[in-house]
C-alpha cells in the first residue's frame, strides 16, 4: 500500500507530474486517520502513562491540562521528545497556552521557543450546515458529470409510485440541492466546469484566530 507510492496534484490547469510519497499517510484514504491514530497512540504510550489530570487526543490535536504550570511544562517536553523519537514534530507555532484564574502572566517555554499566554482562543470554522451544503453540492456536481447510465443518475431519476400525502409536501433531497444551487449561483451546466463548480460551492473556513494576541504589523 505504501511501497513505491506516487501521487499527483490535480489543479484547474491540469495534473502535476507524479512525485514519490516517502513520509506521512495517504491523503483521502479512509484508512489514513486510523493508521495515524494507531501510530500516534503507540509513540505516545509512555507519556500517556504519566500522571495527568486531563489529556484529550483527537487526530493530531492534543490538549494537556494541569493545575501546576511547571508540571505542565515538563509534560509538554515529554510529549515533544516522544514525538521526535518517532519521527514526528511538535508544531510550536500552532501551540496555544491558556491559564484560567491565574495571576501568573509569564509565557510558557518549549525548548528555545516561547508560547505566549492567551486569555482565550478559538478556532473559527464554518458552520456545520455550510460544510454539509458544500459536500452535498460537490457530490451532486460529480454525479452530473457522469454519464446517464451511472447509478447515481439513475437514482436521481427514480420516481416512487403513489401520491404524496396531503398538506404541504416535505422537501426532497433534490429540492434542497436545487435551493442550494440557486443560493450559490450555480446551474446544472456549470457542473462541466469542475473548477468553477468547486469554487462556487466552496465554504472556506475564516481561519484561525488567536484572541488576545496583538496583530503584528506588515
Image (tube, helix red, strand yellow):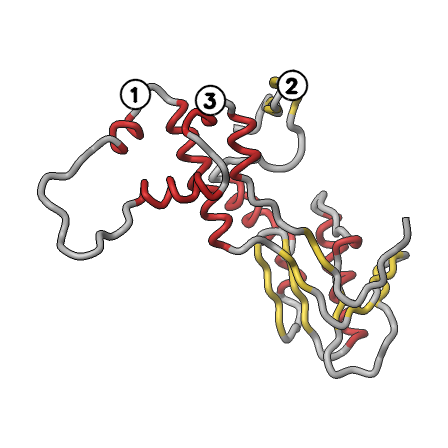
Left or right: where does residue 187 sit relative to residue 216?
Answer: left
In the rendered image, which residue does mark 1 sit on?
148
Of circles 1 and 2, which is in front? 1
CA–CA distance in space, label 3 to label 1: 14 Å
Looking at the image, residue 98 sits to the left or right of residue 113; the answer is left
Q: Residue at x 74, y 66 (%)?
A: 75
Mark carried by residue 16: 2
Above-or-below relation of 133 to 54: above
Residue at the image point whose x is 85% and y is 58% from the top: 215
> Alpha-carbon distance for marks 2 and 3?
21 Å
Which residue lies under the disc numbered 3? 192
Mark 1 or mark 2: whose residue is earlier in sequence: 2
Query: Would residue 179 be found to the left or right of residue 215 on screen?
Result: left
Whichever of labels 3 and 1 marks the residue nearer the N terminus, that label is: 1
**Where is 8 relative to 199, above or below?**
above
Q: Secondary structure at mark 2?
A: loop
Quadrant location of residue 174?
A: top left
Amino acid at each position: 500500500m505504501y511501497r513505491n507510492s506516487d501521487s499527483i496534484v490535480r489543479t484547474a490547469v491540469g495534473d502535476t507530474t507524479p512525485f514519490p510519497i516517502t513520509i506521512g499517510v495517504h491523503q483521502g484514504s479512509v484508512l489514513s486517520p486510523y493508521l495515524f491514530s494507531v501510530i500516534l497512540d503507540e509513540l505516545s504510550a509512555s507519556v500517556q502513562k504519566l500522571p495527568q489530570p486531563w489529556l484529550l487526543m483527537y487526530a493530531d490535536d492534543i490538549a494537556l491540562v494541569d493545575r501546576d504550570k511547571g508540571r505542565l511544562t515538563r509534560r509538554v517536553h515529554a510529549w515533544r521528545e516522544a514525538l521526535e523519537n518517532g519521527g514526528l514534530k511538535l508544531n510550536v507555532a500552532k501551540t496555544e497556552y491558556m491559564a484560567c484564574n491565574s495571576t501568573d502572566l509569564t509565557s510558557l517555554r518549549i525548548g528555545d521557543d516561547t508560547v505566549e499566554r492567551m486569555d482565550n482562543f478559538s478556532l473559527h470554522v464554518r458552520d456545520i450546515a455550510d460544510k454539509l451544503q458544500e459536500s452535498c453540492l460537490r457530490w451532486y456536481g460529480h454525479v452530473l458529470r457522469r454519464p446517464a447510465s451511472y447509478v447515481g443518475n439513475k437514482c436521481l431519476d427514480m420516481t416512487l409510485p403513489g401520491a404524496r400525502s396531503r398538506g404541504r409536501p416535505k422537501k426532497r433531497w433534490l429540492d434542497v440541492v436545487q435551493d442550494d444551487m440557486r443560493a450559490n449561483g450555480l446551474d446544472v451546466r456549470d457542473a462541466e466546469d469542475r473548477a468553477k463548480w468547486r469554487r462556487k460551492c466552496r465554504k472556506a473556513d475564516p481561519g484561525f484566530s488567536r484572541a488576545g494576541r496583538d496583530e503584528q504589523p506588515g
